Amino acid sequence: SLKRKLTTTQHNLASSSDAFVNLDATVPDDLHNIWKDQETKALAERLSNPNAMDIFEVQLEKAVPWGCATWLARALKVEESQIILSLDAWKINTGATESQRLDISHCCDRLQSQINGLVQTVATYIGANWDCGYDSYEYVDPDNSEDDPFITPSTGHAEHVLLPLPSYIGLPQFGQLGLSGLVDQELQLRQGQANDTLHEIQLVLADKAVVYCTQIRHAKTMP
């Protein structure tokens, strides 16, 4: 039994050595030299400074949990809803009817419900003690009146609430949680979001160009 274990160990040692050599070959020379210097320094100082050996500890960053991309994409959609609601509220800010203001109020309630659900989801990944540094965008409505029941005070507008996104919370807090990879994921999602928007703009412009050429501008050759 021991002989069989020894044979297996020797075989695995050879394959492990080959795998290490292949992995080591991918390391840049500059980084390789830095590691060698750190190793030499740690071994030289290990008796007088045991903490110097800490560089040999395995340093792993916590993997980004499954589902993070889902709630990041969900947060970006909520952010889009905030922008749309903010524009709609601004358009009817003056001379709005009671029905229009009620519609905006209902949209605000739905948006706030989405934000509450988003915050609860995010708490499972980053905890409930996240902080953006400030509660909402600075928003001042000069036409706001406390006597009007259909105008919500500006400090509570759902369309101005900051969402729990890495770009708002900050990289240091995500780094402490070992979730700095979420920052890159948000950037990739925002890039995709921008590309989709540009594509939609191109389609709209192309459609307008076709309408202009076929329905508006009928050029005829004058005799």
Image (cartoon, grey):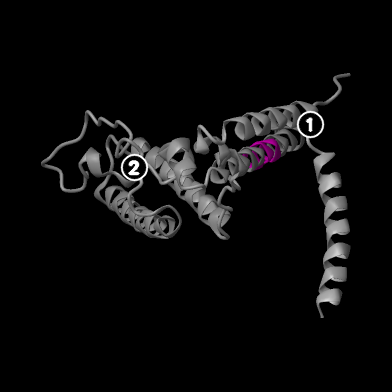
Disc number for residue 131: 2
Q: Position of residue 149 (x, y in %)?
A: 16, 48
Q: Nearer the viewer, residue 215 or 12?
A: 12
Tell whether 44 sits left or right of 167.
right
Q: Position of residue 36 (x, y in %)?
A: 72, 31
Q: Amino acid at mark 2?
A: Asp
Quadrant containing the N terminus in the rendered view: bottom right
Tell whether 161 sits left or right of 54.
left
Q: Amino acid at mark 1?
A: Pro
Q: Position of residue 189 (x, y in %)?
A: 60, 44
Tell whether 215 sits left or right of 2.
left
Crowdedness near tag 2: few (<14), some (14–19) or many (≥20) residues, C-alpha within 10 Å: some
Q: Nearer the viewer, residue 206 or 61?
A: 61
Q: Earlier in the sequence, mark 1 or mark 2?
A: 1
- In space, the residues marked 1 and 2 are separated at their CA atoms by 38 Å
Residue 92 falls in image quadrant:
top left
Q: Was residue 173 drawn as part of the magenta stretch in this picture?
A: no
Q: Was residue 202 drawn as part of the magenta stretch in this picture?
A: yes
Q: Position of residue 35 (x, y in %)?
A: 69, 32
Which residue corresponds to the image point at 50% horizontal and 37% vertical from the top-left? 51
Which residue corresponds to the image point at 51% horizontal and 55% vertical from the top-left? 71
Q: Residue furthest front?
A: 47
Q: Residue furthest top?
A: 223
Circle 1 sits in a helix, a strand or a loop, which is it?
loop
